[in-house]
Amino acid sequence: MIDHLDHLVLTCVDPAATTHFYTEVLGMQLETFGQGRLAFRFGNQKINLHVRGSEFEPKAHVPVPGALDLCFIASIPLEQVIERLRDKGWPIVEGPVARTGATHPIRSVYVRDPDLNLIEIAELQA
């Protein structure tokens, strides 16, 4: 019945800090849509942004910053991801470590975004 994920919604406290992380650190593209809404586009997916207390309807029952644990597959080797994170001054909280992805074994590093969501960045392993 379900084919793929189109978008997810991230609730943040500080939209400027969140935009910096997802665009400048992770390299996603900032997109404006609708009536001034923001999203971060990568590949064929996007993350729509809500600001705590000003969420768009309908919304999650309890939209809270810092409740997500997301895993992204990198388009570049993990060593380059690590170098970019270091260049941007963004701390790695764990990794690189071997994990099990949805379709392949993966090798990952973990960081936290400005709202302390856990962000896993991985490369596929053979």
Image (cartoon, grey):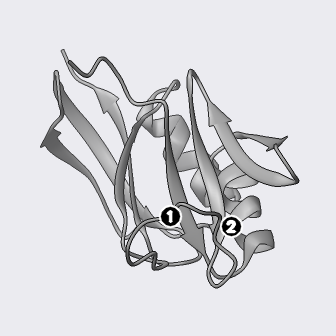
Name the residue nearer the viewer: 63 or 104: 63
Disc 2 target residue: 18
In this rendering, the label closer to the viewer, 2 or 1: 1
Q: Tell me what residue is drawn at x 68 percent, y 44 percent.
A: 40
List x then y, in percent, for residue 53: 64, 85
Spatial separation of the CA atoms under disc 2 and disc 1: 19 Å
Q: Tell me what residue is drawn at x 62 percent, y 50 percent.
A: 48
List x then y, in percent, for residue 112: 46, 70
Image quadrant of residue 124? top left
Element assignment for label 2: helix
Q: Residues within 10 Å of mark 1 (few under 14, many from 20)?
A: few
Image quadrant of residue 28? top right
Amino acid on which the number 1 mark rests in the picture: Lys
Q: Residues within 10 Å of mark 2 (few under 14, many from 20)?
A: many
Query: Tag 1 or tag 2, which sits nearer the N-term?
Result: 2
List x then y, in percent, for residue 44: 56, 21
Element assignment for label 1: loop
Amino acid on which the number 2 mark rests in the picture: Thr
For the C terminus, give its image quadrant: top left
Farthest-out residue, front: 58
Q: Is residue 65 left or right of residue 16?
A: left
User: In this rendering, is residue 72 above or below 112?
Assistant: above
Disc 1 target residue: 59
